[in-house]
Amino acid sequence: MSDNPITATVDFQKDGVQHGFLKLPHSTDASAWGSIMIPITVAGRGTGPTLLVTGGNHGDEYEGPIALFDLATRIDADDLTGRVIIVPAMNYPAFQSARRTSPIDGGNLNRLFPGTPRGTITEKIADYFQRTLLPMADYVVDLHSGGRTLDFIPFCAAHVLADKAQQARCVAAMTAFNAPYSVMMIEPDGTGLYDSAAEEMGKVFITTELGGGGTARADTVAIAKKGIANLMKHAGIRSGPLAQAPSVSLEMPEQDCFVQSETAGLLEVIVALGDPVQKGQTLALVHDVTRTGLKPVSYHSPISGIFAGRHASGLIALGDMVAVIAVEV
């Protein structure tokens, strides 16, 4: 039996649609015996696969929460064969504060897996997913976007895995999701990721980056909604044809895909997201803002490919990501 203090107000084995909470006790000056109440919906009927779908792993990314709060209002258990577990805002304190990380403990949920039941608030959330929710799932989808500091072309991603049979199942799910771009990724740093936790359990896992800039657009929200509907059908949880459109296949095969700033200042990006770029092409300029009359520092593409991601804010700091380049397959 888990010693995690989180308890669910829903019955994961019960048929029908249930709306409730994951209750995490949290004693504060404002509420001595209070709890953090993380919204959850469970919908199921009969025997079949389980889809665990999440948003708000980072609290300043909005396509996932919008699509999933909407799904929770519309899902009908009579349409299902199996189970769908919906958590629109995994790191709920971060989501409530419009921050990437938790305002309570500074925790970045997507760097703290497997978590610990005796740790910080964010570590307890990670542990509950690790030991309670992930083991229930056959398919896991974590909806991300760039948050306040990054902006991306809208893509769904699967990871390069050692188990090629598992990788093929993840690629099939990515293809079914059918974002405008489909990307095979090697993470810059996989330590502590929810992604890795799911994949190490043998789950079919896919993720997204659907825009960014600390907001959500109508087109990127629509991609998230369509993608989840498609995946439910792909998994056999719902019936019906998939809604399909052309998707450009990309990969991020090496560290050269990522361009980081070695200066601080005012960022001028001179190519548009989705544009083709050539090796050596200037992508951005960083202007020194401490005085006038200084030439900006130029940042160039280390490889040829597609301009897939960029720093979203006007000011950039030393070490920030300037650009992400993906290679068309």
Image: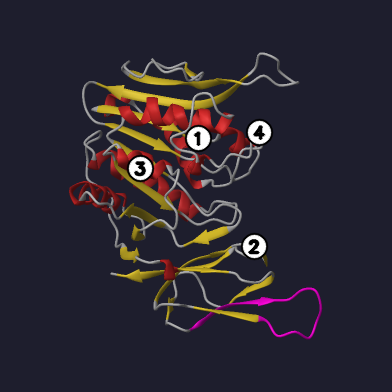
Give amino acid for label 1: Met
Q: Nearer the viewer, residue 217 or 108?
A: 108
In the rendered image, residue 23, in percent from the top left (x then y), is placed at: 53, 20
Which quarter shows the N terminus?
Answer: top left
Mark 3–mark 1 distance (CA, rounded to whole Å) = 17 Å
Element type where label 3 sits in the image: helix
Mark 3–mark 2 distance (CA, rounded to whole Å) = 29 Å
First reached walking from the N terminus: tag 4 or tag 3:
4
Mark 1–mark 4 distance (CA, rounded to whole Å) = 14 Å
Q: Is residue 308 left or right of residue 184?
A: right
Task: Tell me, for residue 104, which label it has, or none.
Answer: 4
Q: Is residue 150 above or below residue 19?
A: below
First reached walking from the N terminus: tag 2 or tag 1:
1
Task: Tell me, for residue 90, which label it has, or none.
Answer: 1
Which quarter shows the C terminus?
Answer: bottom left
| Magenta-span inclusion, residue 285 | yes
